[in-house]
Image (spheres, rainbow, N blue to C red):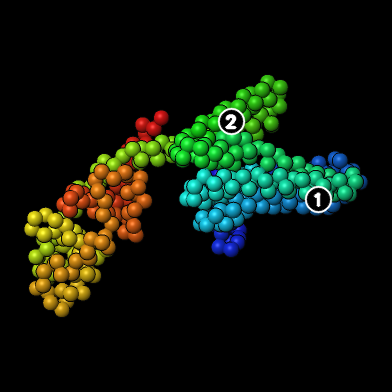
Amino acid sequence: MFGRSFRIATISGIPVNVDSSWIWIAVIAVFSLWTRFERSYPGLGDGQAIAYALVAAALFFGSVFLHELAHAVTARLAGIRVEGITLVFFGGFTAARSEERGPGPAFAIALLGPLTSLTLGGLFWAASSVEGDGPLSSMFRYVGFINLFMAIFNVLPGLPLDGGRVLQAVVWGVTRNRATGTRIAAKAGIGVGILLFVAAAYEISRQNVISAFWLGLIGLFIFQGARASEQQAGVADRLAAATVADAMDPPPPAVPADMTLSETLDRFLRGRQGEAFPVIEVGGRVIGVISFDSARAIGSVDPLRPARDAVVPLEHVAVLRPDERLDEAASRLGSTNSALVLRDGTLVGSLTGGAVYRWVRSHARSTS
Ligand SMILES: [Zn+2]
């Protein structure tokens, strides 16, 4: 169901994608609206009924888009980079690193979506009462109802719904611990999913197969999203409890500081242009790193000078201690996505993004 997505627009640098499931939703929505208009207003011709159905569907999808845009704009205003909006089958999600600026902005970003739907619902409702009882007002009433439904449904307090993000931000603000907020909001999401399954079972018992199908499908979506959030919180906890020493690789080969640059180039650097190697003095103290570029800059002029003369000093190198927290270390890996691990100036290992990823994967299975 959640298959490919298509880029439909880029609005002030934010890519807007539509999931392929939207095509089917659009077909179903237009068709059911069309039959609804034909049934309620027998005086309408086919062409008019289809036109009302198309406009109603367009207003519905436009409303979903405005809901997501509200999240994205709030994130932007809070100074958070928005990676994109993807509209999925009964809503959408906005990929933004809303955890970046603390619980306050996360709260606002989550809340502005449902508030937008509520406002749109009110506006369409008001528009429907202006025009009396014709097909136009029926169309506005329908779109208004959909928006009110989206506002109410989305504030159910469980991840991955907006209400879950609000709850997550509130718990985060109160406990000053984001992982606690995530865990509680995820548990609530699992509860919401189960309640929807119960409602689906009740609908089946009353032979309402179609509403049972929708309740079950949405319940499954929420249940899975909540489980995924819970696992992420578990990973975050594990990263916070672990140290660099848990995930680091053995030390890379080191260049003796008095090896000549021509020998360093031959033995370490040729063919490994993207890499940098630690340079150590006789006592084992690391003084920096050497790369193909830094070695050749001096080595091409004087190949017999020692490696220490071409070193990039430690101040310009990502360096970690083995007892540092792994989550903080992972966020400091820098542009090369790697760091040297030093204990009292001595090389004990190296940490890369790949090593952190492998460590997380090997510890993900035991997540509660
Ligand atoms: Zn939303």
Q: For the C terminus, which image quadrant?
A: top left
Q: Are marks 2 and 1 in contact (CB under 8 Å)?
A: no
> Would you say residue 32 is visible in this rendering?
no
In this rendering, does residue 116 appear at all? yes
Label 1 secondary element: helix
Kind of residue sitting beneath label 1? Tyr
x and y percent of residue 213 in the render? 64, 31
In the depicted view, which residue is nearer to us: 192 or 171?
A: 171
Disc 2 residue crowd, few under 14, some 14–19, many 20+, Cα 10 Å:
many
* Whether residue 298 is situated above or below residue 79 in the rendered picture: below
Q: Quadrant of the N terminus?
A: top right
CA–CA distance in space, label 2 to label 1:
35 Å
Seen as rendered, the residue at the extreme bottom is 301
Q: Secondary structure at mark 2?
A: helix
Q: Closer to the N terminus: mark 2 or mark 1?
A: 1
Q: Which residue is mark 2?
A: 192
Find residue 150 and report its horizontal and vertical position in percent.
68, 41
Q: For the point 19% across and 66% down, which residue is it? A: 311
- The residue that appears at 58% across and 48% down in the rendered structure is 109
Residue named by callout 1:
52
Callout 2, which amino acid? Val
Number of callouts in the render?
Answer: 2
Residue found 35% across the figure and 41% down from its top: 239
Q: Residues within 10 Å of mark 1 (few under 14, many from 20)?
A: many
- In this rendered view, identify the residue nearer to me: 24 or 80: 80
The residue nearer to you, when weighing 6 against 326, is 326
Instruction: Please state the horizontal and vertical placement of residue 78, each as a whole percent of the image.
Output: 55, 55
Locate residue 62, reporting x and y percent. Answer: 69, 52
Compared with 161, 254 (above or below) is: below
